[in-house]
Image: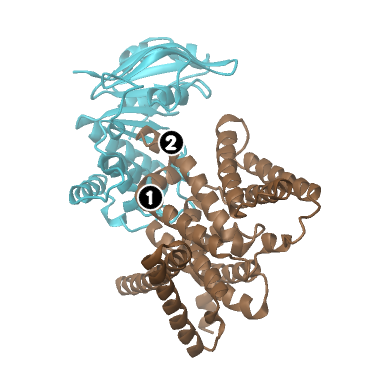
Chain colours: A cyan, B brown
Amino acid sequence: MTDAVRIENVSFSYGEAPALRDVSLTIAEGEFLGLIGPNGSGKTTLLSVMLGLVEPDEGSVELFGEPIESFEDGHRIGYVSQKSTEKGTAMPVTVEEVVEMGRYPHVGSGRLREEDHQAVEAAMARVDITDLADRKLNTLSGGQRQRAFIARALASDADLLALDEPTVGVDAESRDRFYGLLDELNSEGITIVLIEHDIGVVTDRASRIACLNTELYHHGDPESFHESDALERAYGSTGQVVGHHH
Amino acid sequence: MAVERAARRGLVRVGVGVTALLAVVSGLYLLATFAEAYGPGTIGGLGATLATTLVDTGHLLGLLVGTDLLRFRFVWNSLATGVLIGIVAPLVGTYLVHREMALIGETLAHTAFAGVAFGLFFAASTGWSTPILLPALIAGILGAFAVQWLTEHTDTYGDVPIAIMLTGSFAVGTIIISIGGGFSGLNIESFLFGNVGFVTPSGAWLMGALSAVVVAVIAARHKQLLFITFDEQAARVAQLDVGLHNTLLVVLTSFVVVGAMQVLGIILVAALLVVPVAAATQIAADFRESMYLGVLFGELSVLVGLSVAFPLNAPPGGTIVVVAIGIYALSVAASTGEFRAVSTH
């Protein structure tokens, strides 16, 4: 099995301020990686480097075995950015139109074909938003919007979901349902990279943990993370994992 | 609910059909007059016959609704240009408004103004006269690239490059005009506020050509532009060429602005990029419908605005924008329930 993501010796600075220092990690296909770290620790920057949104000062990135500079299969990646629940608040775009965007990389300038419409319908059905298809995005709850974004990724045949704090502004019940959906998608073979402030959620669900604060303090399974002192080192002495019981 | 939606879609389709018909007639008129002016032999003759037939038919239809104005070619030039502006301005404006770039049209209009001033200065200094909209178009495109470059390469908020270019190009334009002693014979007011008799045949042909390019590009790149407008980061990850499409959008905006400034004037040209779109956004059921409604509202604003401006000999920029704002107010009232509350009492 090839790696979905391979990051080697990546460094990146915003001007003089280093955001990432010599970070290396690999994400195997089918893995659920939880990326944690304090505010300003470089999590979003690392995700941006991983997805080709930011070019690292040093180091290299590969996606599905291909150097990011020559990677052309953008449809294999579904990205839900920070504050995505705020997108489209003044734009009259419907759920179906958002999910259709997942098919755009497949059709280029052409019209959506029958198979594209089927993929859109299947994606909406998969995340249980078929009945919301004609609703405008700005009339939905935060949780419903997030499912629309996941459906967009599924419609594009994404093999890798990259999610940057996707549940900000989402109520607790919808958040649990959303993470349940991520578990299901991961069990179906989709690789997931999740940035999340709630460390308990990440350690409960992810198969691998990457703990970051400019440098990578830990990369391994949740058990080895709990046994390590990465949390204290990355967050300082006040950091602790809060258990969740659902 | 379903019946209401079907009726609404039917109404929108009828409106789009009427607009398309007007666009075809306008396009035919512009092609015919161009062929009449420049076509060799038979083509020139055919152009003249078609142009005369269209004008005569329009004149008769005009008499039926109580106007004699449609027998004049200059009225046809303004109307044909206006009809095309009513289509392309809201089309491009839909992406601009939802990218929070509503004022870029105003900026590029001011850049085009600097181009006009430079063209006049060049002509006065060298004795070489050029069509007045050509330097405007070149300046508009250069302004579009400059705004794009400043946005991508400086650490300022999104509207700062727009403000810098807007004021800077207007400053350059006023300096050039001042140096040129006001360019006798040039009516600056016509450039600022529009003029019903200001559209020349060459200006109308330019608008026709620019409109064809704008519609063709949007038809070919709508999906990419929509995705980038909605979620630029996700579009980058999906490997759409965001830089290319951003540049394309500002260049299309400069096309619309240069074509539209003949009728609307520099000061008011941005209104037709923004106000019909804002009105459509209030009541549209989806993005596609918002584009259709934007075009319908833009067309209605232009036609009613010109109809008022001609008999009053008022600046059409003013009348068109006032009508557009009126449609926007009705749209806001309808979307907030005020309209229904008033109509039931």
Q: CA distance from mark 1 to mark 2?
A: 17 Å
Disc 2 is placed on an element classified as helix
- Using the image as rendered, state which of residue B253 and residue B313 is in the foreground: B313
Front-lying residue, B321 or B60 = B60
Quadrant hosting residue B162: top right
Q: Label 1 amino acid?
A: His
Residue at the extreme front = B41
Q: Chain of mark 1?
A: B
Disc 2 chain ID:
B
Q: Is residue A242 in view? A: no
Location of the C terminus of chain B (image quadrant): bottom right
| Residue name at image x 44 percent, y 53 percent | B214
As drawn, B46 above or below B151: below
Mark carried by residue B233? 2
Q: Earlier in the sequence, mark 1 or mark 2?
A: 1
Frontmost residue, B93 versus B288: B93
Identify the residue position indicated by label 1 in the image.
B222
Report x, y in % for residue A185.
24, 34
